[in-house]
Amino acid sequence: MASTTTTIWPGLLIAGLVLLAAAGPAAAMGFGANTESLDFAKSKGWTPSYTMYWVGPWSKSSWNAVEGALIKARDAGVTPVLQWYYWGDSISVNCVKYGCDGRSQGDWNAMGATLAQKVNSIMGGRQAIIIVETEFNKGGIDNWEEFDGILANHIYMMKSKAPNARFSLGFGAWGQDKYGMFDRAVGAVHMTSFQLMRASTRDTDAQISNAPDVIKSMTVTLKGKFGKPVLLHDLAISSYGGKEWLQDQVMKNILSRKGEYEAAGLTGIVYRDVRDNPSMPLNNYYGYGERHFGFWRADGSAKPVWWTWKAGATGGYVAPATSTPPSSTTSVASSGVPSFTGIQAKNWWQQVSVSGSPIRVDVRINDGAWIQMEKKSWGAYATSKPLNAGDKVQFQAGMPDGKWHWSPAYKANGDGSVAAWSGSTSSAPAPSTSGSVTFTPVKLNNYWQQVKVGGSVATVEVNVGGTGWAHMKLESWGDWTKSAYGPAGTSVQFRATPHGGATVYSGMYKTA
């Protein structure tokens, strides 16, 4: 146990243990989102199990918003998760000791007491969860043993004023070797929890795609070290930077592992925001990325991830039969709904009409990335992208029932008209050979390309989905790698330039 001169309230320690024991076995995993999304989510067919609301020094001038959030959750019959975020990014040893940025220990305890009293008076015997300091273990705090006692004292004080509430300690997903320093604080809470955020403004595609593994790792670490239930109290995966398909794929992977997470000790996942927030301040950690965490765009249209999340949060995610595009020669139009008509495909103008009131319509050229089309005043969907005669064109439509449908593939004739597609993509270079240069793909998935190239070459490049050639990295073990996103079925081609020789092209491959 960490040594400290801070006095712990022994009587409350016993009460805390009694509360934990009375909680019984963990319930099935629940799903939640921020309080502001509750009514919107319900209108779209999903009622969250939790609502999340942030409380901090800004709440001191008026507690009305906090009270309103608690009343809203209580009346809706959902569990409020309050992020008690007093110290925030200002936290440090000196800040806690001497005060900083308008913060002090005295004010922290006074506001904590008020918050607990609000929870007790409004929620009564109904459950509420209070996360004490999300990602507190930073700014040198994780090397200051005395803070363990200070934090424990604060939690016991709040518990005395809100005896029916459940408390959690919010760890940052780093420095796991020092988690044990906070044994007193963990002893005071009912559960532990963590936050997980990803956005292209700071993270690579590989780091974003690794989020499901991080959830498992953090759950196993916290449950294994402390033996208490674990809550993912703030999950946020951004679609900023053309990453809507990656956002959707990551969420598919997370929700498909629900049973695995439950077995490891995870009791719930609370998502940051159902809707994009275009007014989110850009001085936050992820900048523009934080404006695109939602499942719905700011214009009121749904992203692909909404249907994935709704399925998982209302009964367990099961991959739909149409989760990946068909081959270039297969039509998936079933019962004639939806139908794709009025197709135009020429340089700088692509247009299609789709029946059935789609929520979104996309186009892709030469098996490239899907590009969202704009609904025009005359009812058709259109976009303006470069396209040549002979290029391959395909459309997809996301429907109100959550299913995606793909049109057959077409060949652009050059005058705006199209014909049935047959053959390989005309814009892709044909395979060629030069000496002993060979290409052996090692791994091709939706975020990673790895190839073994035989022969002496100076550079190796990859073209994923016709988006352009990108240089690959020569790894220490001899393979060439690149992280570029392409949904399952996206075309992949490699090219290599030998020392003093002509560029050599591989055949065409597809991501798995």
Image (cartoon, grey):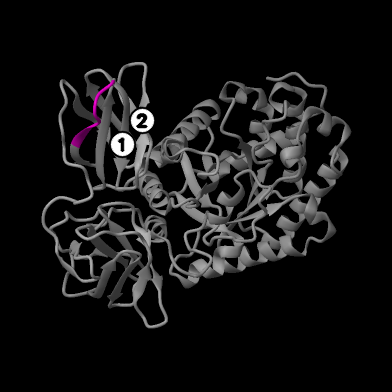
Is 444 rendered above or below residue 62?
A: above
- Classed neighbour count for the residue bearing mark 1: other residues with Cα under 10 Å, few (<14), some (14–19), many (≥20): many
Name the residue located 68 percent from the left edge and 28 percent from the top edge.
Answer: 184
Pick whichever, 118 or 231, lies toward us.
Answer: 231
Q: Which mark is residue 160?
A: none
Q: Which residue is mark 1?
A: 462
Q: Which mark is residue 472?
A: 2
Residue 511 can be seen, yes or no: no
Q: Classify residue 97 by image quadrant.
A: top right
The amino acid sitting under disc 2 is: Met
Name the residue located 44 percent from the left edge and 49 percent from the top edge.
Answer: 29
Question: Quadrant of the image for the C terminus?
Answer: top left
Location of residue 265 in the rendering, given as x and y in whole percent from the top left corner? 46, 38
Name the residue located 27 percent from the left edge and 64 percent from the top edge.
Answer: 395
Name the residue located 72 percent from the left edge and 44 percent from the top edge.
Answer: 159
Is 177 rendered above or below residue 19?
A: above
Helix or strand or loop: what does disc 2 sit on?
loop
CA–CA distance in space, label 1 to label 2: 7 Å
Helix or strand or loop: what does disc 1 sit on?
strand
Pick whichever, 35 or 190, lies toward us.
Answer: 35
The amino acid sitting under disc 1 is: Val
Q: Classify residue 286 by image quadrant.
A: top right
Q: Classify residue 329 by image quadrant.
A: bottom left
Bounds of the magenta segment? 500-506
1 and 2 marks in contact (CB < 8 Å): yes
